Amino acid sequence: MTLAGLSNRIRSNEQRLVDTHKVCASCTGTNLEEAEQCESLDCSWLYARKRVEGRIEFLEILRDFVQEVLDESDLVSKKESTGF
């Protein structure tokens, strides 16, 4: 997977998270920022929200790791081309 592909997946999951927040806000009668405070264990949207939050966190960690590897690879290539 490419860095651009990871970024697209993160954006897609972020939109899903916004959508779940909208449902939670509607149900609880709160604004979007307060919607994530809902902890109703019998609500499937709570689990959907937590699942998407976990995916986003994983994908961001993966993206950062891939970026580090690419940066190190670029650094090694530059050193080899300059002879240092």
Image (spheres, helix red, strand yellow):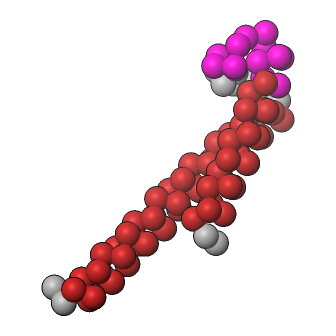
Give the extent of the magenta segment: 23-35
- Residue at point 38%, 69% (across, down): 71
- Residue at point 83%, 16% (across, down): 26
- Residue 57, position in %: x, y? 56, 49
53 shown above or below 2: above
Q: Nearer the viewer, residue 71 or 9?
A: 71
- Residue 41, position in %: x, y? 75, 29
Q: Quadrant of residue 24?
A: top right
43 shown above or below 63: above
Q: Would residue 72 be visible to someone looking at this image?
A: yes
2 shown above or below 81: above
Q: Quadrant of residue 72?
A: bottom left
* Image quarter hosting the N terminus: bottom right
- Residue at point 69%, 19% (across, down): 32
- Residue at point 73%, 48% (across, down): 12
Q: Is residue 25 inside the magenta stretch? A: yes
Relative side of 73 to 62, left or right: left
Relative side of 46 to 80, left or right: right
Relative side of 58 to 11, left or right: left
